[in-house]
Image (tube, helix red, strand yellow):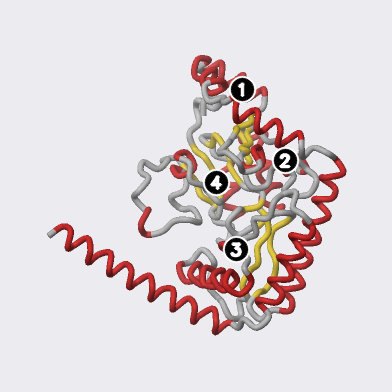
Amino acid sequence: MLAQPDRKTIVSFRGNYSGKTPISLSLSKHGTLLTESDREAFRPYYANLEYIDLDEPGCESRLKTVLNRPDVALVWLELIQGAECRPIPDSIIELVHRCKASGGYLVGIDEVLTGGWRIGGDFLVHRRLALNVDVSAMAKPLSDMTVPLGVALVTDDVYRRAAARNPKLVEKLTRHYRCELSAHIALNALSGCADPERIVTATRLQEMFAEGLRRISAQSRIFAAVSGEGGLIRLTLSRRWFPFHCRSALGCALEMALAELVLSNCGVFVPILRFHQRIFADEAELREVLNRLERGTRQVRPVHVYVNAVRGLLTYARRARYFRSAVDWATE
């Protein structure tokens, strides 16, 4: 916002993973993780926010109209949306790129889940695109998931424009949050990963694992396909038996019920059916996961998922009723 002092609007896309930091929560009122309990929990939400729903008819036309407005400061997106592992369509990325020069906005890419060689052999995924990126965010791969660590990367142009507006604040943002321990951990984590042969091997294993998941999906009555790319992939439910969107309450309940079945039958933890394998995972480890999934899901039928979902909802209702009774007793 310092680099774009006369503009206030941020454009983002419904389905972004959002996250749990204060800044991302302020942009997440209409995000994937919205539930009844947190509609008002994180106010004030950022006021000048335009959400684009990629599932709505005419979304490209609406996006083009929004991008041509003179108040748009930033377009913020995940190239592969973290919750559904759904790539942003090429036509949307091309539209953002095509309108950027005339629109005058900045483009920001969330690389928290895609950066650090998680997708193919690129450290940052957006480098493979013909898209001029001004801001990028990274976190998890910088420390091998050992400590909370995040960075925001900006171009020299954005830095100079922001510094011209408020040099003291830019200096504070640049230096105040630096941590020598985090920098030391990040340096060692990145130094150990930058071997070209290791990156080639990781890319090969990512494709091997994805191919194994596609094979399991093709043989299953409950899975339809595999979405995502590289090390950011998930299994999707068959629309024939599960016609509910994964962002709906019922769709989310069914996915959680299936994840519980996978955990109990296979000993594999896959929340929201998304895999969190290490970027430089061991081949034997990945093959063991595939073998367990293949054996453990072979006999699972749609009815098993529905029964487990009902069981879970009843358990939740009993616990909620017990909790309310306890609160009433304590209040009295």
Residue that lies at the very extreme toward the right in this rendered image: 197
Number of the front mark, 2 or 4: 2
Q: Secondary structure at mark 4?
A: strand
Is 320 on the left-hand or right-hand side of 251? left
Choose the circle earlier in sequence order: 1 or 4: 4
Amino acid marked by disc 4: Ser
Residue pointed to by mark 2: 124
Q: CA gap, disc 1 to disc 4?
A: 22 Å
Q: From the viewer's perspective, is residue 136 above or below residue 168?
A: below
Amino acid marked by disc 1: Tyr
Q: CA gap, disc 2 to disc 1?
A: 20 Å
Q: Secondary structure at mark 3?
A: loop
Q: CA gap, disc 1 to disc 3?
A: 42 Å
Residue 198 percent coordinates (x, y): 83, 45
Q: CA gap, disc 3 to disc 4?
A: 30 Å
Q: Are marks 2 and 4 in contact (CB under 8 Å)?
A: no
Say whether residue 85 is visible: yes
Is 11 on the left-hand or right-hand side of 312? right
Residue 12: which disc? 4
Residue pointed to by mark 1: 159
Q: Secondary structure at mark 2?
A: loop
Residue at the (80%, 45%) spot, across then down: 121
Residue 35 percent coordinates (x, y): 41, 59
Residue at the (53%, 23%) spot, across then down: 173
Number of the front mark, 1 or 4: 1
Choose the circle earlier in sequence order: 2 or 1: 2
Which image quarter: residue 258? bottom right
Residue at the (41%, 73%) spot, across then down: 313
Q: CA gap, disc 2 to disc 4?
A: 20 Å
Residue 126 percent coordinates (x, y): 72, 42
Q: From the viewer's perspective, is residue 75 above or below residue 258?
A: above
